[in-house]
Amino acid sequence: MKIISDELGYSPAQIHEMLREEFLYEVLHIKTRDGITQKKIAKSTTEITTTEAEDYYSSIRQWASITLGLWIPEPHEETPIV
């Protein structure tokens, strides 16, 4: 979150919330008078499985690379010296 936070100028907490809403959500199907409507709600990162967490962080890395031109290392990777 810090790499993206530093790049965009928002706090890590704001970036965390934005990314959860974008990549870590479930869809609720709400029955209304007009039919069914869908609403996305963000999941908590503390309540997901290891596999879900890996998918979440992979999605963030891919998005950051494509959208922002940022390289975000895997936990075991070192940041290259520029």
Image (cartoon, rainbow, N blue to C red):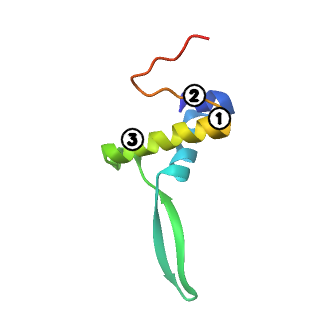
Return the disc, 1 or 3, that comes first in the chain's sequence: 1
Residue 43 locus on image (x, y percent): 43, 53
Query: Is residue 28 shown left or right of residue 81?
Result: left
Instruction: Give, as a three-letter code, the residue at label 1.
Output: Tyr
Q: Residue shown at 66%/32% (left/top)?
A: 69
- Residue carrying label 1: 10
Q: Are marks 2 and 3 in contact (CB under 8 Å)?
A: no
* Structural crowding at the residue carrying mark 1, measured as other residues with C-alpha within 10 Å and reported as few (<14), some (14–19) or many (≥20): few
Residue most extreme to the top: 81
Residue 61 locus on image (x, y percent): 53, 36
Residue 45 locus on image (x, y percent): 40, 45
- Residue carrying label 2: 71
Q: Quadrant of residue 70?
A: top right
* Structural crowding at the residue carrying mark 2, measured as other residues with C-alpha within 10 Å and reported as few (<14), some (14–19) or many (≥20): some
Question: Residue 20 versus residue 52: which sits nearer the camera?
Answer: 52
Q: CA distance from mark 2 to mark 3?
A: 17 Å
Q: Residue shown at 36%/44% (left/top)?
A: 46
